[in-house]
Image (spheres, rainbow, N blue to C red):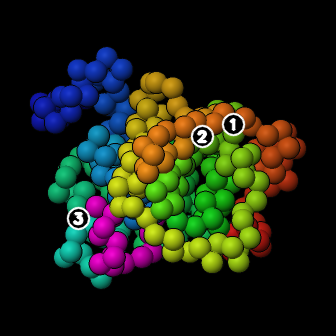
Amino acid sequence: MLDDNRRKRYSRHLILPQVGEAGQEKLLAASVLVVGAGGLGSPVIYYLAAAGVGRIGVVDSDVVDVSNLQRQILHGTGDVGRLKVESARARIAELNPDVEMVPIAGRAEPDNVMGLIEGYDVVVDACDNFPTRYLVNDACVLQKKPFVYGSVYQFEGQASVFSKEGGPCYRCMFPDPPDSDLVADESDPGILGVVPGVIGNVQAAETIKLIVGTGESLSGRFLLFDALKMRFNELSIKRDPDCRVCGDSPGITEIDPGEVSYN
């Protein structure tokens, strides 16, 4: 039940017929795992906490660097050298005491990913590398959990919702990771600081809608954002019946630590 303090804090949600008290109570009871506390994770974590999502797990092994501050708004100058998950926990505790933030100082790996996501309702991809993305996608499909995807590059961003109620997964669109040599050559291409903010907010909105059960999700749709042209475009995507993980006869039925996609 919502007490007077919560009714005041979430008053702008409560007057929305699509949310209301019932929707806010769903948010307070919900749990979300965010993989990454950097450029994408910062707005995702901030807005989910502000919205009153009851438990937010954050997976990240990095410490705050001064070069992060141009886009990673969850952290401040005084946090340089601090673990990002600890910086995030302090910031969220200040923002909203209703929220339990669970810091997980490490990486999603083949030997722990199933346990990491098991206790959460929704998983948000805020990572910055392909092995983790494919790993978390596969784990979400195997556990039938929605996977809110986001990615950014220079002036561009992408977002979608995968593994939702028979919808496509990430491998339906991108069956295999790109060549590792190509990725290494472009490992630091630069990024306009506001682009992760745009895409991260899209991810936060999609997550809130999934929890509340309202609106039309990005499942089956692939959103493309171009900051230079200030355009949003959209592609239609469908579940691939031959997909290795969510297809009719999947080849991936468990997380295999020896799978090359995860190394």
Residue 251 at x, y percent in the picture: 85, 53
What residue occupies the far front of the structure in this picture? 229
Q: Is mark 3 on a helix, strand or loop?
A: helix
Identity of the residue drawn at 36% across and 20% down: 18
Label 3 sits on residue:
90
Q: Are marks 1 and 3 in contact (CB under 8 Å)?
A: no
Question: Residue type at mark 2?
Answer: Phe
What residue is shown at x 24% (from left), y 24% (from top)? 14
User: In the image, 207: left or right of 255?
Assistant: left
Q: Is mark 2 on a helix, strand or loop?
A: strand
Name the residue that disc number 2 marks: 222
For the point 81% across and 46% down, which residue is it?
A: 243
Up-down relation of residue 12 to residue 124 (above or below): above
Compared to residue 91, the image places residue 1 above or below, namely above
Residue density around tag 2, few if under 14, some if 14–19, many if 20 or more, within 10 Å = some
- Residues drawn in magenta: 59-73
Q: Mark 1 points at which residue?
A: 237
Q: Which of marks 3 and 2 is in front?
A: 2
**Relative horizontal placement of residue 176, taking residue 213 as reference (left or right):** right
**Label 2 near label 1: C-beta < 8 Å?**
yes
Is 184 in the magenta?
A: no
Q: Where is residue 211 in the image (x, y as percent from the top left)?
A: 44, 34
Mark 3 vs mark 2, CA separation in Å: 34 Å
Who is closer to the viewer here, 253 or 218?
Answer: 218
